[in-house]
Image: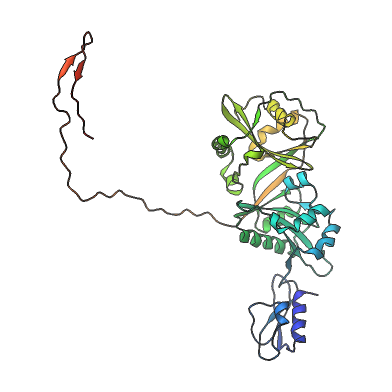
Amino acid sequence: MSYAWDAADTTRRQGYTAFGTERYRLGGDLPTRYQFTGQLPRPSTRRLSRLPRRGRIKLDFWDGESLISVRDFSWQHLLTLFRYRAQVLPLDYELFLTHGNQASLPAMLSSMNLGRGVYMGVYRSENGVPDLIGQMRYTPGERSARMSFLAPEPECDTPSLSALMENFVQRAGRYGAFHLLAELDERHPSLVYMRRAGFSVFAWQHIWHFAADAGVPGELRAWQPARNGDQVAVRSLYHSLVPPLVQAAEPLSMHTSRGLVFRHAGEVLAYAEAVYGPRGIYLYPLLHPAVENVPEVLADLVQHLPGRRGRPVYFTIRSYQAWMEPALQQLHGEVLPRQALLVKHLVQALRAEAPARLGVLEARQAEPTASIASHVEQHEWPGEGVPRLENERFCA
């Protein structure tokens, strides 16, 4: 039974009667519209319980999925999500590879804490179609929000997918995010439908996996923890290597507490940001093409990564840094299928005109100045023949 039918039935129990129904097309459905006399700002079953029995009001309800089809995740959906734990479609591989399946019981309980910046929405379907659950994460102060997963894994362009993604877009904009990001396997059929929902591809990536017991030789020990003084050099490296299309979707948010830099002759030529989790360590390397012996440099990063503690290491290699993949292949890394990096822009950058500032001359007369030099005497230094000025006096 839909929410609209519940609200309409509650209105009838309060003593009101419907004076007409209307059939119309919305989103491909043909829902029934129930009209009641009077007026309220928005339909709500809580307000309906306090409505007076006398007077005239007007309420519009839609019998079907076109009114309130997406709801916030609550305790009553925990069992449904637990049943979907084997049908999760990851949309954030960093989170998936470092913290595991987000449909597990610990992850579900942590997602109920709204202070962590986690939002989950549920699309309630009808006619035996499974409900679609999605999760989005946003860190206050960041410019982008990220989709975490969808469950169960959608295989076709259902109305639930479009409605759920539109709900996440509205919620991300309400949080203050400028972009909504997602990652998806390029072979997955949902990639086409994500594009229809307004997402576009801004880059591609390969993830390279090194197991916990992988023997990777590396004795350079050239990587050092990033310091606050390295921010200018790292930002210059980022802006010179990353295309503007990627910079617009993923601006650099440098965290010196988990960053490593590679220096050569006192110059920062490489930067890697490490994301730690109980299941593994996720690396975002950024290398300048001037780096020599790339296999040795990457092997040194894997071998002497701080706080590894036997966890597997994952390298994410973006399409604009694909020249590093042969080096990782020499280190016998395992590559995962290529993923598409998707973005939906919530704001549009506009160029604002700034009026030119012109200097204003004060309306006053020029004051006479003193002579440049007074009483100039010339002497010769003994043996040099260079004239010397005495009693020199200059005016500004």
User: Which residue is farthest front?
Assistant: 391
Q: Name the colouring of the figure.
A: rainbow
Image location of residue 216, percent across then percent down: 77, 28
Quadrant of the rendered structure where residue 118 is? bottom right
Q: Is residue 51 visible?
A: yes
Viewer-nearest residue: 176 or 319: 176
Quadrant of the rendered structure where residue 50 is? bottom right
Q: How many numbered dots are placed on residues in this image? A: 0
User: Which residue is farthest top?
Assistant: 383
Q: Is residue 286 visible?
A: no
Instruction: Determine the residue positioned at 74% across, 47% down.
Output: 95
* In the displayed structure image, the side of residue 129 where residue 41 appears, left or right: left
Image location of residue 226, percent across then percent down: 62, 35
Viewer-nearest residue: 40 or 127: 40
Viewer-nearest residue: 47 or 350: 47
* Above or below 374: residue 72: below
Image location of residue 213, percent across then percent down: 82, 32
* Above or below 231: residue 42: below
* Above or below 187: residue 223: above
User: Which residue is farthest bottom?
Assistant: 54
Image location of residue 282, percent across then percent down: 72, 40
Quadrant where the image shows the C terminus = top left
* In the displayed structure image, the side of residue 351 where residue 52 appears, left or right: right
Quadrant where the image shows the N terminus = bottom right
Viewer-nearest residue: 210 or 388: 388
